Amino acid sequence: MNKTYRDLIYRFQNQGIEESQSTGAILIGKAPHIAPEAWLNTLYPPLSKNDVQALEKELGMEIPIDYKKFLLDVSNGLDILVGTFCLDGLRRNYKRSTDESRQPFSIITANIRERPRNAADYHFFIGGYDWDGSYLYIDKRTSTVHYCDRDDATSLFQWETFEQMLISELKRIYSLFDERGRKIDEDLYTTPIKR
């Protein structure tokens, strides 16, 4: 994992780090102000090449190279500030115990089951925001990353690369929270733009 990603993802490590016994997820920043077993950030074990191939087969499409590299080298998805910002990945099961549930949101959902209208076949959905359920997708023709409504894939904001999006979004979102992971203004949107 590159140092910039690591520094940003592990921002709350001074509040504790723990590994999930059943999923191998790295839980970063205990958040008792949210719930007794809440953690601010969750990093998942990277996928194997076989996992990625199986996921692409299930999706019926190739995963864009920048996101595939993230899944293989960094994390199988990501959960930042208890779902404020999430990147999707391979969800292995839907067991409901606290430890077993520490998995990414399924990348299948937005790409197949709940694909927004106007989504082109070259749009690959990678995650989103809990503020309003909005999505992020990669345009496979250009590798640009776009922010869109949960029901409509019309681009509302864009970044030139996946790396640019991830770094800038982590920094922007962290600026909305204090050093303990508490939101500074509960009424302020956490999406890239006000809508």
Image: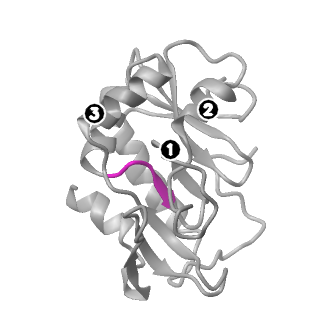
Q: Would you name the residue on which mark 2 appears?
A: 110
Q: Nearer the viewer, mark 3 or mark 2?
A: 3
- From the viewer's perspective, is 183 left or right of 171? right
- Residue 130 drawn above or below residue 127: below
Q: Which quadrant of the view contains residue 85?
A: bottom right
Q: Earlier in the sequence, mark 1 or mark 3?
A: 3
Q: Position of residue 103 (x, y in %)?
A: 50, 56
CB atoms at circles 1 and 3 under 8 Å apart? no
The kind of residue tagged 3 is Asn
CB atoms at circles 2 and 1 under 8 Å apart? yes
Q: Would you name the residue on which mark 1 appears?
A: 88
- Residue 192 drawn above or below residue 41: above
The reply to whether the magenta stretch includes residue 77 is: yes
Q: Is residue 192 visible?
A: no
Q: Which quadrant of the view contains residue 4?
A: bottom left
- From the viewer's perspective, is 168 left or right of 98? left
Q: Position of residue 27 (x, y in %)?
A: 43, 72
Q: Judging from the image, what secondary structure is the residue with disc 3 in?
A: helix
Q: Earlier in the sequence, mark 2 or mark 1?
A: 1
At 57% from the left edge and 27% from the top edge, which residue is drawn? Answer: 111
Q: Which residues are magenta?
A: 75-79
Q: Earlier in the sequence, mark 3 or mark 2?
A: 3
Q: Position of residue 24 (x, y in %)?
A: 37, 64
- From the viewer's perspective, is 14 left or right of 39? left
The reply to whether the magenta stretch includes residue 63 is: no
The kind of residue tagged 2 is Ala
Q: Would you name the residue on which mark 3 appears?
A: 50
